[in-house]
Image: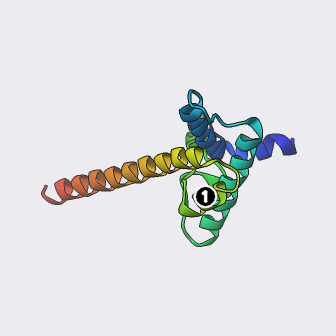
């Protein structure tokens, strides 16, 4: 049961690592199983650090709510700390792929913020 709980708590991290593994699967530097496991731990560690700082990630070890489970567990945020720690586990091309995921996440967050602002502006004009 403890292994199941650990697996469930790291679903967002595993989803992010799966995204990274998929992006690297047809390159000359695919992720190994050991690298995947290490990256789950790196992301879990950096999510725990982020949660401890009073901010929340998109997943992490704060527990997964039912909506996240229904949606596949969500993904964990790739922070600069994640990239820094990952550099000891990944090769340079693999780190670059992780940075691409980080940039995609940041763009998605910016788009979501703009959409929220647009909805708030529209609601304020009514």
Residue drawn at the location 45% of the way across and 49% of the way down: 105
Q: Which residue is mark 1?
A: 82
Figure quadrant of the N terminus = top right
In the picture, measured across the screen, residue 30 lies left or right of residue 80, that is right
- Residue at the limit of the structure toward the left, as seen here: 125
Question: Dot 1: what SS?
Answer: helix
Regarding residue 92, the answer to whether it shows in the image is yes
Q: 103 or 121: nearer the eye? A: 103
Figure quadrant of the C terminus = bottom left
- Residue at the limit of the structure toward the right, as seen here: 1
The part of the image, by quadrant, that contains residue 5 is top right
Residue drawn at the location 61% of the way across and 61% of the way down: 84
Instruction: Measuring from the top left, give residue 72's x and y in whole percent.
Output: 59, 35
Instruction: Measuring from the top left, give residue 22's x and y in whole percent.
Output: 57, 31
Regarding residue 71, the answer to whether it shows in the image is no
Q: Crowding at label 1, few (<14), some or many (≥20) Cα neighbours within 10 Å?
A: many
- Residue at the limit of the structure toward the bottom, as seen here: 53
Residue drawn at the location 33% of the way across and 56% of the way down: 113
Q: How is the image coloured?
A: rainbow
All told, the count of numbered labels is: 1
Instruction: Measuring from the top left, give residue 25's x and y in whole percent.
Output: 59, 29
In the picture, measured across the screen, residue 87 lies left or right of residue 7, that is left
The part of the image, by quadrant, that contains residue 79 is bottom right
Instruction: Measuring from the top left, give residue 85's x and y in whole percent.
Output: 66, 60
């Amino acid at each position: 049961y403890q292994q199941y709980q650990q697996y469930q708590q790291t679903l967002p991290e595993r989803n992010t690592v799966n995204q990274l593994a998929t992006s690297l699967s047809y390159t000359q530097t695919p992720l190994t199983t050991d690298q995947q496991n290490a990256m789950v731990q790196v992301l879990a560690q950096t999510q725990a650090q982020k949660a401890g700082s009073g901010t929340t990630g998109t997943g992490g070890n704060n527990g997964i709510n039912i909506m996240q489970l229904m949606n596949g567990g969500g993904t964990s945020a790739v922070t600069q700390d994640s990239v820094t720690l990952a550099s000891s586990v990944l090769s340079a091309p693999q780190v670059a792929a992780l940075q691409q995921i980080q940039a995609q996440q940041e763009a998605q967050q910016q788009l979501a913020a703009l959409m929220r602002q647009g909805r708030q502006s529209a609601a304020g004009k009514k």
